[in-house]
Image (cartoon, rainbow, N blue to C red):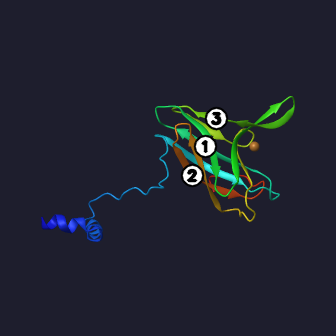
Amino acid sequence: MKKFLIASAAGIMSLGLVACGSDPEPAPADAAPEAPEGISVSDGRMNIPAASGNPAAVYFTITNDGAEDQMLRAANVESAESALFHETAEWSGQVDMQELLQVNVPAGESVVFEPGGKHVMAFGLPEGLEAGGELEVTLSFVRGDKVSFPVVLLGPGEEYNPGE
Ligand SMILES: [Cu+2]
């Protein structure tokens, strides 16, 4: 009975939890949704636009080691006003970019976002981005889960050398 009375006092109860240490930490309400099982992203990078105000392309490799296909539906680039999936394509001798509304990442495969192919186009980037810095990119899937990863900032036109 005495124990019950102590536990009912919120302040003392929280002290008890700290001292005990066996209770799992409650997940914060704003915790990022978990990535789908088996999804990982590597080689995230973005060339800072040569002229401020221009959009920039984000490249990366997304791998699905899970058992289910995963469909990308949206991209968010930290501090950019908006971002879209694009694919560079040549049509009738002209190089052009098309918006991709969804990108499938099949089970057991990787999808490479690279120059001349798929990329995330980031619009409305702030001024003052510096090579060597990082931005966080978040990709959303059709089922509502998300994956976030760091994107290293390269100077305008700077080649990406992951070995260095
Ligand atoms: Cu583009």
Q: Quadrant of residue 14?
A: bottom left
Closer to viewer: mark 1 or mark 3: 3
Left/right placement of residue 135 relative to residue 34 reads right
| Quadrant (top left, top right, bottom left, bottom right) of the C terminus | bottom right
Ranked by sequence position, the earlier of labels 1 and 2 is 1
Look at the numbered disc 2 and give the secondary structure of its residue: strand
Residue displayed at 63% across by 35% down:
103
| Front residue of this view, candidates 16 and 69 | 16
Residue at the disc numbered 2: 149
In 3D space, how far apart are the residues under numbered discs 1 and 2 (Cα atoms)?
A: 11 Å
Could you say which disc has been placed on residue 140 in the image? Answer: none
Up-down relation of residue 10 to residue 58 (above or below): below
Look at the numbered disc 1 and give the secondary structure of its residue: strand
Residue at the disc numbered 1: 61
Closer to viewer: mark 3 or mark 2: 3
Type of amino acid under label 2: Phe
Closer to viewer: mark 1 or mark 2: 2
Type of amino acid under label 1: Thr
Q: Residues within 10 Å of mark 3 (few under 14, many from 20)?
A: some
Residue at the disc numbered 3: 102
Ranked by sequence position, the earlier of labels 3 and 2 is 3
In 3D space, how far apart are the residues under numbered discs 1 and 3 (Cα atoms)?
A: 16 Å
Up-down relation of residue 75 to residue 67 (above or below): below
User: Is label 3 within 8 A of ligand 1 (CB to nearest ligand atom)?
Assistant: no
In 3D space, how far apart are the residues under numbered discs 3 and 2 (Cα atoms)?
A: 19 Å
Residue found at the very far left of the displayed protein: 1
| Position of residue 58 measured from the top left corner of the image (x, y, whole percent) | 68, 48
| Position of residue 109 measured from the top left corner of the image (x, y, whole percent) | 55, 33
Number of marks? 3
Do the numbered discs 3 and 2 sit on residues whose CB atoms are within 8 Å? no
